[in-house]
């Protein structure tokens, strides 16, 4: 009995990153990269083991400390949680490999005098916070997880210590605190109404009291701010575009998805009796506005990494289409919308990490972060450019990529529920994404215009390529993740 | 335009205040009563004070993560301060003037007393209000006082020993959490050991939390220019 | 009205006040103070509603203690970043927000 409990993946998914993060902190600035890669490799194995177990045996609850809810804190590993845990590991491991090469290259170049400094411990706590959030089934535990994630993300944003990065980090911190403050007020109201914060205990109790409706509104607003839903996206582009490239990859691919995940859980979970079609249409409309606004802004950016950051604003918009497509629609439409939104989480996670990784390599090689300065990069870093283009295929939603499957499912949900106008958003968004991706590719194929500062390590290019290939291959092997999402 | 926007925000906040008031006044009694359940399980928690039982046992997982949050604040501060030292801003006047001899004398007297108070708060936590966080806060206050009195240098370059001390409390807690797996679940304490384990965790936390909170002041971005002690 | 409910109502007002300050004020120090007012409001609601019937609820007290520590950590990080911003730009307002419209 004891041996199976010692080998249970659920507690280790939280313990392991906390342990290596703390060890990396004690080791000191710039240290801990090898530890992180090893830890993330084990974490990937744990996440896959848990996914296999959930797929086979169904969802499982875990009482921390042996105290069952509502007195203690319970964790829940269902299909959705296992999917998000696997997504986290699948993105974080290649990014860690990339980061090792990136910081080695950066500390050698004159333009950037700094290396990894505290990147590794901060990343460890960030990954731990994601695992905590995805496993949590308790409103207050989720609050602590949100704060852990927010502070880790802010620390990473400030990592370069430069003027723009510090300002972006501070703006990010204030937005993040405002979001979690609103969320905490919601928790207080719910606790006042029912005397518990356990999601399982709350689910049968929730009814449309004014205090509960207010709590739901505050929590939704706070989480929308943390997910950078248009027009609350103001903090995202400077933070994601100004951070060191491995950090940008983690923030864009994973961190904003965590608050979206939580919104999804609450909306279709405990707050299901309160949700209205009007509120769902509003979230969908904001998502649609994000798709258009983010893409247009991406087209207008002069800096490459800002272009990629605005693309994140746009791609996050698609996720919010799940609310109108799965609230009060038939089971077939709801299932398609749910699957489409979550495949988009994974596909965008892989593709956006790849895109920031490739962009980081190209910026290093070109010596400056400018779209106009990319001339000749196509000849010098063909692998990185190829990774960027492949990631672009996923973002545009072209077959056979994971982005295509995701958007296809959303399209099916839109048609099945008779809401054709969301289908228009998908088409327009795809065209705009093609426009900003081709803008970069066109520049990169132009002849060399400036003196180069040198090449980049091969590990950078291969890590970016692996992520981009993952995003494309997801389109061919999407059934397993979709089956997992159906559990629970 | 900007003024109009500001008034809109202010009006919306006033509306929220009104909505909160109405919602709170209309709130019926809660169906779940955790206080009674805490009372019932208190004997198995290893401590006699219900708040400490919730913090370190029933909801110990939250507390573990909260210590990580504190470490993260410190890490974020170190990360942001690691960049190029730029524009001249006058050093903190509080640290630039020679320390007041009266203050130094007072600090010399108070610091040992504060140490004593911290020890008492740690011990008291098991059966009355107190505990690691309160004790750690008093320890940190003592360090800040000593720094302001010029008796303690700034921690300009935290070495490995200091980092180990910062992380020790959390590492101990993490070990206890992992050790719980042998007893059946993350953070599960065997009832016979619970009291001793909680005291050990709290002692470790007091030490590290005191140093972390002090570090937020002494290792801050101002410190390096303060020149290692006034 | 019980004392607990009174605390909760006060907390609701503080929360709204802090929210307004956090959005409307430009100076970072004021924003951080406003965040602390907002947070205290949420804590008061939590602890006040927990003790509505006159007996204090240890669960809410433990949660608020956790919340306070988190708020302290966030405030410290915010102050460190603000201090660093001052060092780099000579100003304690975020770019794009007027620092002097504040007093």
Image: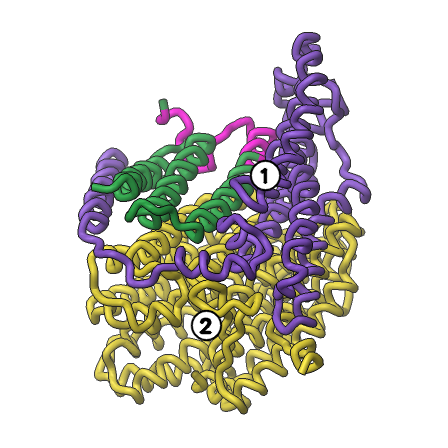
A21 horizontally vs A260: left or right: right
> In what element is the residue under mark 2?
helix
Snapshot quadrant of residue B219: top right
Q: Is disc 2 surrounded by few (<14), some (14 to 19) or many (20+) residues within 10 Å?
A: some
Q: Is residue B220 magenta?
A: no
In the image, which residues are magenta?
A: C80-102
Q: Position of residue A373 (x, y in %)?
A: 61, 55
Q: Residue at x 62, y 28 (%)?
A: B141
Alpha carbon distance from label 2 to label 1: 33 Å
Dot 2 and dot 1 residues touching (CB under 8 Å)? no
Q: Is residue A302 visible?
A: no
Snapshot quadrant of residue B85: top right
What residue sits right under mark 2 in the picture? Answer: A434
Front position in the image: A430 or A413: A413
The purple one among the chains is: B
Q: Residue at x 69, y 36 (%)?
A: B84
Q: Is residue C98 magenta?
A: yes
Q: Position of residue A304 (x, y in %)?
A: 55, 57
Snapshot quadrant of residue B163: top right
Which quarter of the rendering shows the C terminus of chain A?
Answer: bottom left
Q: Position of residue B92 (x, y in %)?
A: 62, 20
What's the chain of the residue with tag 2?
A: A
The green one among the chains is: C
Q: Position of residue A150 (x, y in %)?
A: 52, 53
Mark 2 vs mark 1: which is more N-terminal? 1
Q: Colour of chain A?
A: yellow
In the rendered image of this protein, does residue C22 appear above or below residue A201?
above
Q: Residue A163's mark?
A: 1
Q: Is residue A87 visible?
A: yes
Front position in the image: A463 or A173: A173
């Amino acid at each position: 009995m004891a041996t199976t409990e010692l080998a249970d993946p659920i507690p280790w998914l939280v313990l392991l990153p906390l342990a290596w993060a703390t060890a990396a902190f004690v080791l000191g600035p710039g240290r801990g990269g090898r530890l992180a890669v090893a830890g993330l490799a084990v974490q990937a194995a744990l996440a896959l083991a848990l996914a296999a177990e959930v797929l086979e045996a169904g969802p499982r609850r875990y009482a921390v400390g042996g105290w069952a809810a509502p007195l203690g804190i319970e964790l829940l590993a269902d299909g959705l949680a296992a999917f998000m845990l696997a997504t986290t590991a699948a993105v974080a491991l290649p990014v860690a490999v990339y980061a090792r090469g990136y910081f080695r290259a950066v500390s050698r170049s004159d333009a950037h005098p700094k290396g990894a400094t505290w990147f590794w411990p901060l990343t460890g706590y960030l990954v731990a916070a994601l695992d905590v959030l995805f496993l949590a089934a308790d409103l207050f535990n989720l609050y602590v997880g949100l704060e852990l994630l927010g502070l880790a993300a802010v620390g990473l944003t400030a990592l370069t210590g430069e003027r723009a990065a510090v300002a972006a980090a501070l703006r990010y911190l204030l937005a993040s605190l405002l979001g979690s403050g609103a969320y905490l007020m919601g928790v207080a109201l719910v606790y006042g109404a029912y005397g518990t914060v356990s999601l399982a205990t709350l689910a049968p109790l929730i009814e449309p009291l004014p205090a509960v409706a207010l709590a739901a509104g505050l929590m939704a607003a706070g989480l929308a701010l943390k997910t950078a839903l248009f027009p609350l996206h103001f903090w995202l582009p400077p933070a994601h575009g100004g951070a060191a490239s491995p950090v940008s990859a983690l923030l864009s691919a994973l961190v904003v998805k965590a608050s979206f995940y939580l919104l999804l859980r609450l909306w279709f979970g405990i707050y299901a009796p309160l949700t209205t079609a009007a509120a769902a249409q509003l979230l969908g409309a904001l998502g649609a506005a994000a798709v258009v606004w983010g893409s247009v802004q991406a087209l207008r950016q002069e800096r490459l990494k800002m272009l990629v950051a605005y693309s994140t604003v746009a791609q996050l918009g698609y996720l919010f289409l799940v609310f109108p497509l799965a609230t009060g629609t038939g089971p077939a439409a709801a299932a398609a919308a749910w699957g489409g939104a979550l495949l988009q989480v994974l596909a965008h996670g892989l593709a956006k990490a790849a895109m920031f990784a490739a962009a980081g390599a190209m910026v290093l090689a070109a010596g400056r972060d400018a779209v106009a300065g990319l001339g000749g990069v196509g000849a010098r870093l063909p692998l990185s450019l190829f990774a960027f283009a492949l990631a672009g295929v996923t973002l545009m939603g072209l077959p056979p990529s994971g982005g295509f499957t995701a958007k296809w499912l959303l399209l099916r949900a839109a048609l099945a529920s008779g809401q054709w106008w969301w289908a228009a958003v998908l088409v327009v968004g795809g065209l705009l994404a093609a426009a900003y991706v081709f803008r970069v590719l066109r520049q990169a194929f132009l002849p060399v215009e400036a003196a180069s500062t040198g090449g980049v390590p091969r590990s950078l290019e291969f890590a970016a390529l692996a992520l981009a290939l993952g995003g494309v291959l997801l389109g061919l092997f999407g059934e397993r993740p979709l089956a997992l999402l159906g559990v629970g | 335009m900007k003024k109009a926007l500001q008034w809109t925000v202010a009006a919306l906040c006033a509306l929220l205040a009104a909505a909160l008031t109405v919602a709170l006044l209309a709130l019926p009694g809660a169906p779940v009563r955790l206080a009674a359940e805490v009372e019932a399980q208190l004997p198995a928690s290893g401590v006699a004070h219900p708040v400490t039982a919730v913090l370190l046992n029933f909801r110990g997982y939250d507390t573990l993560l909260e210590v990580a949050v504190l470490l993260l604040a410190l890490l974020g501060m170190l990360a942001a301060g690691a960049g190029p030292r730029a524009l001249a801003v006058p050093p903190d006047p509080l640290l630039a003037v020679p320390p007041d001899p009266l203050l130094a004398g007072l600090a010399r007297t108070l610091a040992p007393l504060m140490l004593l108070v911290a020890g008492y708060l740690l011990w008291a936590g098991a059966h009355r209000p107190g505990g690691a966080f309160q004790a750690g806060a008093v320890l940190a206050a003592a360090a800040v006082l000593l720094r302001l009195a010029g008796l303690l240098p700034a921690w300009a370059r935290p070495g490995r020993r200091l980092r180990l001390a910062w992380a020790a409390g959390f590492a101990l807690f993490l070990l206890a959490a992992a050790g719980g797996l042998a007893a059946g679940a993350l953070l599960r304490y065997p009832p016979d050991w619970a009291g001793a384990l909680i005291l050990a965790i709290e002692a470790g936390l007091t030490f590290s939390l005191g140093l972390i909170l002090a570090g937020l002041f002494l290792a801050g971005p101002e410190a390096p220019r303060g020149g290692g002690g006034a | 009205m019980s004392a607990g409910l009174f605390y909760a109502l006060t907390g609701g007002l503080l929360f709204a006040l802090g929210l307004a300050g956090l959005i409307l004020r430009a100076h970072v120090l004021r924003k951080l103070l406003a965040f602390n007012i907002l947070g205290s409001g949420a804590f008061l609601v939590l602890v006040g509603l927990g003790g509505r019937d006159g007996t204090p609820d240890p669960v809410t007290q433990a949660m608020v203690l956790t919340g306070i520590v988190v708020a302290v950590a966030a405030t410290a990080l915010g102050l460190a970043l603000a201090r660093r911003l001052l060092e780099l730009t000579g100003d304690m307002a975020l770019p794009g927000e007027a620092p002097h419209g504040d007093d």
